[in-house]
Amino acid sequence: MSLPVIAELVAGSPGELAGLLLGDEIVAIDGEIPSDVIRWQFLIDEADPVLSIQRGGLEIEVEVAKNAGESLGVQVDAAIFDRVRTCDNHCEFCFIYQLPKGMRRSLYLKDDDYRLSFLYGNFTTLTRFTEADLERVISENLSPLYVSIHATDPEVRSRMLRNQRGGYSLRWLRALLDFEIEVHGQIVVCPGVNDGDVLDDTLLGVLDQFPELSSLAIVPLGVSSYNTESSMRPHTRDEAKRVLEVVHDWQQHFVESLGHRLVHAADEYYLLAGEAFPEAATYGDFAMHEDGIGMARSFEKEFSDPSTAIVGIRSGFFQSVDGAPAEGYRAARTVGANRGGQITSGIECQPDNVSPLVIRPRQSAPIGILTGEYGAKVLKPLIDSLERNDIRILEVTNHFFGGNIKVTGLMVGEDVQRVLESEPDGHRYLLPDVCLNNGRFLDGLRPEDLCKYVEVVATDGIALRSALEPQEKSNPVSSELVR
């Protein structure tokens, strides 16, 4: 078990006034050793907590004068203080198994921890869930949680998870729903495995066994060029159409039985099938946005009407284990990123990449929007509607992962670099922050490592529309030398 370290301390807060310092290691709070940031928040919410800390090899106690519910003014450097509960499934469709070698070690962490489900929206299979876990979830109201279902047939689910417990671990889902815990479900559809009649049977099983689910996302299998499972392959166009047919049929059944659609297909299915996205109203409050459900429609609505904010800040892939804030996936991903704002960074190509000096392009310069292949399909009609000839979409093909990986969130630095190398100097290049974790791409590169100056823009329609608006009048300095 590692000790959480104070990483942020608000000036004038009860924590600072009590003498806490950056770098202090938290041993216990009121005599209890917190196992994670969830328990930490419960403990520091009490009045006048006593913190046992380690500082310079010494253990000391600090009593903090504060009211119950008052902020301590302290942020720690991690979400899980004890060991993350790793996944003991061996799913042949698991994307972790499809990563190239040599990436950051944290990216290979395969978790099945309900705490990360609550904090970051990670999906858990519940195969390692216990009675003690259920008791804690209920007593501390750790809701919502996110559960991977994949199939309701016990044999099919066990086979997909390659785990005998997979066949009966959904009993925990039933227990969670019995105690009115909000649960969002997910089904990763693998062609020839749990699509077609199996998917139809699974949705019938959901209606029969788990009708209280808040939502159910149907997402396609992601296959990188590093996949070693011969049975795992991308959907064909006809298979994608069939998935949509099943989903649309069951939406009507759920409406008739439950009063709402419950199940939705990921945007990727509509792109694969060449079909139009459902209307925005179909998605309600876009509760499944994090799972790729309704992203296109919400982005379109935000872009067309910047006064409307539909969803909160989104997190990128691997967000929970690499650079994510301890307070959870709802927190800001990139320092300084906000609605309608952007962060600029980058350096011009120089020998050995050593020069810290850059020339910012003029705000009136032509604009290139960097995005993945699916993002380009969504953005094209929106950009065309502006009828401007100074904006172009720069589609970034994902050579790093290969396969059918085309989402913007998995763009990496070397692929972005490849595109920028053939682009002219002096233009503005906009990079969505969804592909960054703690300021880095998944391949370890940073925006400032790129050979062109880029502006990192929050991944929503409002921020992009704001970045595209002419800004010369508010900023008379059109070119600036920065360090």
Image (cartoon, grey):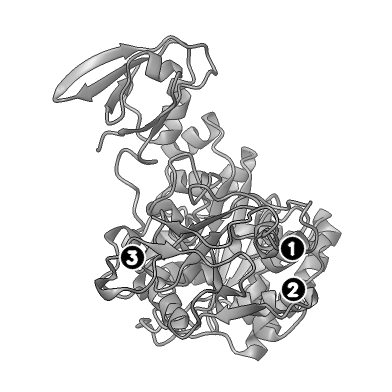
Which residue is label 2 attached to?
382
**Closer-to-camera residue (471/210):** 471
Sequence-wise, the earlier of marks 1 and 2 is 1
Q: Secondary structure at mark 3?
A: loop
Picture residue at 71% right of the left edge, 54% below the top: 211
Q: Amino acid at mark 1?
A: Phe
Q: Which residue is mark 1?
A: 303
Q: Amino acid at mark 2?
A: Leu
Q: Quadrant of the C terminus?
A: bottom left
Task: Kindly state the secondary structure of the residue where label 1 is placed.
Answer: helix
Callout 1–callout 2 Cβ contact below 8 Å = yes
Which residue is at the front of the view, 399 or 428? 428
Taking depth in this image into account, of 349 and 9 the one nearest to the observer is 349
Residue at image x 73%, y 53%?
A: 310
Number of other residues with Cα within 10 Å of mark 1, as a class: few under 14, some 14 to 19, many 20 or more: many
Looking at the image, residue 3 lies above or below residue 306: above
Q: Position of residue 464 (x, y in %)?
A: 65, 62
Q: Residues within 10 Å of mark 3 (few under 14, many from 20)?
A: some
Q: CA distance from mark 1 to mark 2?
A: 8 Å
Is 279 placed left or right of 454 in the picture?
right
From the viewer's perspective, tell me whether residue 191 is left or right of residue 279.
left
Residue assigned mark 3: 444
